[in-house]
Image (spheres, rainbow, N blue to C red):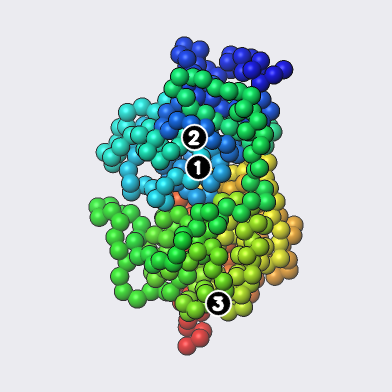
Amino acid sequence: MSPVDIAKFCTSFVGEAAMTAKPTACLVLADGTVFYGHGFGATGQTTAELCFNTAMTGYQEIMTDPSYAGQIVTFTFPHIGNTGVTDEDDETADPFAAGMVVKWDPTQPSNWRATGELTEWLAKRGRIGLGGVDTRRLTRAIRAQGAPHVAMAHDPDGNFDLEALVAAARGFAGLEGLDLAKDVTCAQSYTWDEQRWAWPDGYTKRTGPGHKVVAIDYGAKRNILRCLASAGCEVTVLPASATAEEVLAHNPDGVFLSNGPGDPAATGKYAVPTIKGVLEADIPVFGICLGHQILALALGAKTVKMNHGHHGANHPVKDMETGKVEITSMNHGFTVDSQTLPEGVLETHISLFDGSNCGIRMADRPVFSVQYHPEASPGPQDSYYLFKRFAAAMADNATADA
């Protein structure tokens, strides 16, 4: 069956919206499956890996999370766009997700914080949206076959070259073996002093002396840096390519390894030597997401590509040392293989969805990391203790050196 024939066949599956109005956008999977719907945001075409996210809120934060570079996000929650957008919720200056797929077209925003509409926000930033899609069927396809390579197109006139779109989807190289941290990291170092948002003052600035922390930016989210500042840290952010000598030249009390996109093994080619050099300095180290994976590589473990990854704000994670369960936010398509953890490196957290690794620490040193995002706080405060633990480790280390 040709892609055009498949497109006609799939029309019966794309929902009522696509059958009552001419499609203006489509999503084409590498196997030839086509989903039609209504386009919004930017026009044009893009290729990416397709994932799904189960979060009920935070679509703006998700789109601007550098960890989604190279991916189109299918939102399983249907009400996307209903709270509008505000500059305060951007995790970076521009979105890194290649596009979004939703069940219902975005409506007029209904939230006191909104300063704009999602459709206009996407258009200004060159990102394509596709609405009117049966996202439940699409999610089941992702779960069954793994994160597929796709092409998405938005044309107000509804003219699509399906043969070319299938070829584009099949030609997408994928994320395995791809170093994307170099594309999303900062161009030069900078300092950060903004703290977490709090009523009624919003974002405030940290003042006074604090723990000197170097954060290596593999794709850092702003709210992670805010959490570090709120925990009493003077934060200096360095690019992903920073060497151990460049990191240690700042004489840090601790080093933070940020989240980010792509294959950790690819980024690890230059990041692992840096982390090994930092570990020799015997100072506290804390990693999140990609930072967790690269730390594991530096300690001798391995990482593997997951079938469809973990993306959402409702993921239960068990702390193996306390027995407590945290509700966490996750966004990763690779995971640390816990079977490869070397002696002296302990598994501290696991996913209660599939048992995959979600945290490690060194047995005899204040070096630890987690796979999930404690700064996203879906619990809402279940995981914030990790930032306090990092600050306490730096305080203890300073006392021991005194």
Badge 2, how many Cα within 10 Å: few under 14, some, many 20+? many
Given contact means CB atoms under 8 Å apart, are the residues at marks 2 and 1 in contact?
A: yes
Q: Is residue 384 visible?
A: no
Question: Helix or strand or loop: what does disc 3 sit on?
Answer: helix
Given contact means CB atoms under 8 Å apart, are the residues at marks 3 and 1 in contact?
A: no
Q: What's the distance in space between the residues labelled 2 and 1, CA to CA?
A: 8 Å
The x, y position of residue 235, in whole percent, is 41, 68
Q: Is 331 rendered above or below residue 303?
A: above
Instruction: Please give the residue where the numbered disc 1 appears in the rendered image.
Output: 97
Question: Helix or strand or loop: what does disc 2 sit on?
Answer: strand
Seen in the image, is 183 located left or right of residue 10? left
- The answer to which of marks 3 and 1 sits earlier in the sequence is 1
- The answer to which of marks 3 and 2 sits earlier in the sequence is 2
Instruction: Please give the residue where the numbered disc 3 appears in the rendered image.
Output: 245
Seen in the image, is 306 located left or right of residue 225? right
Badge 1, how many Cα within 10 Å: few under 14, some, many 20+? many
Q: At 44% across and 58% down in the image, what residue appears?
A: 224
Q: At 53% across and 49% down in the image, what residue appears?
A: 67
Q: At 40% across and 66% down in the image, what residue appears?
A: 190
Q: What's the distance in space between the residues labelled 3 and 2, CA to CA?
A: 40 Å
Question: Helix or strand or loop: what does disc 1 sit on?
Answer: loop
The x, y position of residue 7, in whole percent, is 62, 18
Residue ranking furthest to the top: 20
Q: At 28% across and 53% down in the image, what residue appears?
A: 202
Instruction: Please give the residue where the numbered disc 2 appears in the rendered image.
Output: 100
Of the pair 333 and 32, the residue shown nearer to us:
32
Count of marks placed on residues: 3
Q: Is 308 rendered above or below residue 13?
A: below
Seen in the image, is 379 located left or right of residue 356? left
Q: Amino acid at mark 2?
A: Met
Q: Amino acid at mark 3?
A: Glu
